[in-house]
Amino acid sequence: MYTLPARYGWVMRYEKILVEDSEKYFDLFDPDLYNPREWAKMAKAAGMKYAVITTKHHEGFCLFKTDYTDYQALNPPLCRKDLIREWVETFRAEGLKVGFYYSLPDWHHPDFEIDRIHPQVPKDPIGIAVR
């Protein structure tokens, strides 16, 4: 989800985008170029033995089915599928091992601490972000 603004990673932090403002991208999430079958074949042909995929980035959007949040790939109208399950099945079918990156920070969760890297980090009285 963090790539939808199409500028760079950590766009929420660097541009201080509020969580509620970033949610406009949810309905636009469309993995139209998602093709794990092709990627797995290419990875195997390149001699790769394993691949690692990001399952949830710090903006909180899950690419897999979960009972803990609605902020997941199964809910946007243009996706509606468990992208990680499909990826795992196709990579394993090609004989590749799989690994997962899961970001513990979750800026979308209301109870996540607003720390120095959170997009909503408070500013000091003269307007400079607290570090």
Image (cartoon, rainbow, N blue to C red):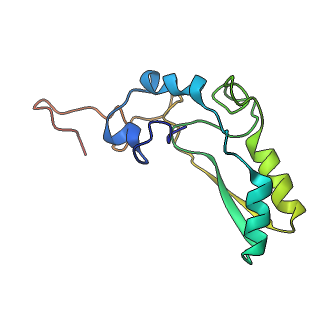
Percent of width and height locating residue 47:
74, 78
Percent of width and height locating residue 123:
22, 32
117, 5: nearer the viewer: 5
Residue drawn at the location 32% of the way across and 42% of the way down: 14
Left or right: 82, with 94 as reference point? left
Residue drawn at the location 50% of the way across and 37% of the way down: 4
Percent of width and height locating residue 128:
16, 38
Which quadrant of the structure image shows residue 40? Answer: bottom right
Left or right: 31, with 83 as reference point? left
128, 4: nearer the viewer: 4
32, 109: nearer the viewer: 32
9, 66: nearer the viewer: 9
Quadrant assignment for the N terminus: top right
Left or right: 72, with 59 as reference point? right
Residue drawn at the location 50% of the way across and 42% of the way down: 3
Which quadrant of the structure image shows residue 11? Answer: top left
Query: In the figure, 27 relative to 65: above or below?
Result: above
| Number of numbered discs visible in the structure rendering | 0
